[in-house]
Amino acid sequence: MVSFPARSFLSSSPSSFLTKNPEILNIKPNPNKPISRKNPTPQKSSLSCFTINQQQPFTIQTSTVSQKVQSLDFEFKSLPDPIDRVKRLLHYATILPPFDDSLKTQENRVLGCTTQVWLEVKMDTDGIMGFRVDSDSEISKGFCSCLVWALDGAQAHEVLSVKTEDLLEMNVGLASRVSSRFNAWHNVLIGMQKRTRDLVEGKGVKYAHCLDDVVNL
């Protein structure tokens, strides 16, 4: 399998597809409250501080890249105010999986972006794709987080089947579809697909069906 670290999502924004609704707090009694002069015996009824389980990522019932793209489309269209969409993107920027600074090389730069964007792409022996992206722009990070959520762990042919028109209709983040940040989204997708295709072609005959599947869509 692709050797990227496991992802864990924690949300502080309104309910979303990428992250769990934040209104899940575990309020538990603290049976081991320290004994003090003011508290000579443990009080089982006292409450501990609020705790949030960060170890269980939220997964929605979608199994294909197409369904995930449709889910994102629905999510952002449900936020008619551009400010709300920007806030959602800024939140998603905070949950973008980590990117090793050593990988921020010129070779990994995504060309055509006005902001700096770095992309790492891997494919495992089963043709499953793994993506990591980072940017020096928080809004671009939010876009990249959505792309990683939709494409990371997908089959190569699923990644290659995504059309830029699918993202144009989403109209996420900013009011203008021709903004520099949107160009970053577009260029990152193209970069993901180009590097996926290069990896498939580099693997030879064993993975040729990945390209055939795209042609037959």
Image (spheres, grey):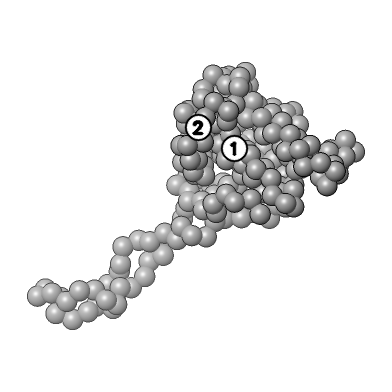
Q: What residue sits right under mark 1 in the picture?
A: 120
Judging by the rendered image, the residue that carries numbered circle 2 is 104
Q: Position of residue 180 (x, y in %)?
A: 56, 19
Name the residue: 48% across, 48% down: 11
From the viewer's perspective, is residue 7 above or below residue 83?
below
Q: Is residue 174 visible?
A: no
In the shown orientation, is residue 57 left or right of residue 2?
Answer: left
The dot on residue 48 is: none
The residue shown at (51%, 51%) is 9
Quadrant holding the N terminus: bottom right
Q: Is residue 19 left or right of residue 69?
A: left
182 relative to 48 in the view: left or right: right
Name the amino acid type tagged 1. Glu
Q: Nearer the viewer, residue 94 or 128?
A: 128
Label 1 residue SS: strand
What secondary structure is found at the residue carrying circle 2? loop
User: In x, y percent, where is residue 146?
Assistant: 60, 39
Task: Report if residue 177 is visible in the image.
Answer: yes
Outermost residue, bottom side: 41
**Is 79 situated above or below 44?**
above
Amino acid at circle 2:
Lys
Which of 215 and 181 lies nearest the eye of the viewer? 215
Pick the quarter of the image with the C terminus: top right
Residue ID at (59%, 51%): 3
Real-space Cα separation, disc 1 to disc 2, in angstroms? 9 Å
Q: Which residue reaches farthest right?
A: 216
**Is 27 placed left or right of 79 in the picture?**
left
